[in-house]
Amino acid sequence: MPDTGGEPTGDRYPVTGISFRTILKAHLLYIHTTTTTTMAHGTFEQLISSETATLVDFSAEWCGPCKMMAPILEDLKSKTGDKARIIKIDIDKNPKVAAMYQVQSVPTLILFKSGKLLWRQSGVVQSEYLKRIIEQHG
């Protein structure tokens, strides 16, 4: 297995700098690094391995349709509450994670539960449809 960039140290994940407490309490979690370093694979794997459905939005800062997804995901989170976790991954700042899931266009949304990929779609997707997908796989 390749080097994952290390385990969480102290009270923060090494690359993202996000505290464990923030991850546990976050309703809508955006993962954006402030440097060009990639996210540790172990950290990402931990996030998607939850029993809670985890919707990952692979996006990029330069992507117009990705910017349209932000209010859609906020609306989705208000509708799903604790039934789902929503994570935003910037593909330019986390290319290894994007490559691992063969993300070639953005936005790409992938739903995971217990580490298993359950659903995937590229493009802007409305919150009602995403809510149905989460409920279907929840």
Image (cartoon, rainbow, N blue to C red):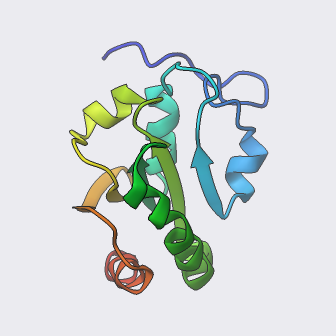
**Residue 120: x, y in percent?**
24, 61
Which residue is located at x 52 percent, y 33 percent?
Answer: 43
- Picture quarter with the N terminus: top left
Q: Nearer the viewer, residue 93 or 49?
A: 93
Which residue is located at x 74 percent, y 58 percent?
Answer: 25
- Looking at the image, residue 49 lies above or below residue 137: above
Figure label count? 0
- Looking at the image, residue 130 lies above or below residue 116: below
Q: Nearer the viewer, residue 70 or 78?
A: 70
**Residue 69: x, y in percent?**
46, 65
- Picture quarter with the C terminus: bottom left
Residue sitting at the far top:
3
Which residue is located at x 38 percent, y 77 percent?
Answer: 130
**Residue 11: x, y in percent?**
78, 31
- Looking at the image, residue 23 lies above or below residue 26: above
**Residue 17: x, y in percent?**
70, 30
Which residue is located at x 57 percent, y 84 percent?
Answer: 79
In this image, 38 relative to 22: left or right? left
Residue 46 appears in the rendering: yes
Quarter assignment of residue 124: bottom left
